[in-house]
Image (tube, rainbow, N blue to C red):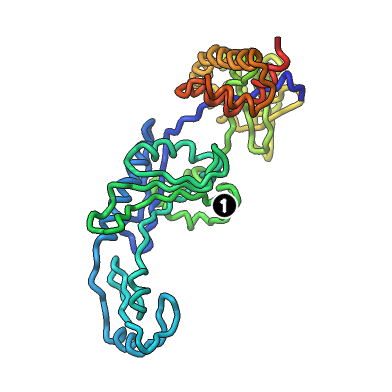
Amino acid sequence: MDKASSTYTYQHDNVFSIGYFVYCSYGNLLSGYRFHRDKDCISWFAGELKNLAHEVKSILSANVVMDFTRDDWRKFNSATHCHICEKPFMKNDKRVRDHCHLTGRYRGPAHSNCNLNYKDSRCIPVVFHNLSGYDAHFIIKEIATAYDGNIVLLPITKQKYISFTKHVDDTKDENDEKNICVTLRFIDSYRFLASSLDKLASFLNKDKLRVLRREFSHLSDENFNLLTRIAYKFLEIGIAVGSMSHVEIAISDTRGNRIILPHATWTAFVEKRADIERLVQSTTPSSSLMIQDLVMELVKIRDVNTVKLSLCDKCTYMKPSTVLFILEQCVDHAYFNLCQYTNSVNDKFKYFVTYLRQNCIVNKFEAVNALRKVYDKNSNIECELIMYALGDIVYHAQHDE
């Protein structure tokens, strides 16, 4: 690809829905699924984690009386090894009865020191799939500032983290000399199950989806099967950054095909809404519609009506209902909103290019250090231009006049 024509898609993702499942290994006391749909879902999730930390603190602070039977007495008196370290009891070793403080269950005989050091963890693992690759960006800022407590990062780069841990300071026990608090440790399950959720979920039979089935028990079997189909990203709207930034719409299908609609084509696409609706609702295969350079055809694939979109030498296939969704006002609204940002993106891009050119900066390393001194830390546009479009900025600083 010609470097001068390279573009970078600038987009801003907003989280509108979040759900999580708590698994309690000691029973169903805390286990359960919770979700929230709204613009404040990230702050809601941060609050839920804080509440969970306090619930865990309360449970760990309890000390259930040991349930010790005659059979347990017999096993305790005849034991020869510590069940914790698995080393034998010596003649002068002090032997004690170890039990779970949460359930009262007797666990086995133990050395006194082993028993004292064998404590329940105050760390709550929070498991995300692809945390380090994507999801961490949505939550780490909120988690860091929502309540008191340090954050400890285990980073790969400045943008990616293997894991991070949040200390919930107000769960500290005043009677504990060590002053230990409950911590939330965020880990990435992709590092242990290196496959997509689509692939992992495909290994499960429908009867194994007990939590999902319980939450959507009102659905018929047909609708439940529809719900469990893995969705795919068929529409992307973003700003292509360059010397003349513009809004771009990319349409993809399940086969990985992707076409980009120019502004004029998208405008014509929306204007022909009525014609498109008639086409996709038609029962006659091989019907077609020309929208500038975009060709829309209704074809049969496995006896199912499918819409084929062709532009230049590329094509995509999708359901008629998907095409109708693209025509919904929410898509047009998102497109219009992004158009309002293009002038700002252009101005920021040109400002950075001019600054580098005036200071004779010709490589990325020098550019990063220089732009850090002049960019507005509160501007999402400036931050993401430096983070993701630095190569284009440096290139245009060297070549454009």
Task: Spot the residue most to the front.
Answer: 359
Relative to 45, is 359 on the left or the right?
right
What residue is rendered at 33% in x and 85% in y? 76
| Kind of element beneath mark 1 | helix
What residue is rendered at 29% in x and 86% in y? 73
Quarter of the picture containing the C terminus is: top right
Q: Nearer the viewer, residue 287 or 89?
A: 89
Q: Quadrant of residue 121?
A: bottom left
Q: Nearer the viewer, residue 95 or 121?
A: 95
The answer to whether one can see residue 265 in this image is no
Q: Nearer the viewer, residue 250 or 245?
A: 245
Q: How many marks?
A: 1
Quarter of the picture containing the N terminus is: top right
Residue marked by disc 1: 191
The answer to whether one can see residue 67 in this image is yes
Relative to 272, is 81 on the left or the right?
left
Percent of width and height locating residue 117: 36, 69
Circle 1: is it few (<14), some (14-19), or many (20+) Cα within 10 Å? few
Q: Nearer the viewer, residue 86 or 309?
A: 86
Percent of width and height locating residue 43: 36, 36
Q: Is residue 348 above or below residue 133?
A: above
Q: Is residue 87 above or below residue 166?
A: below
Q: Quadrant of residue 105?
A: bottom left
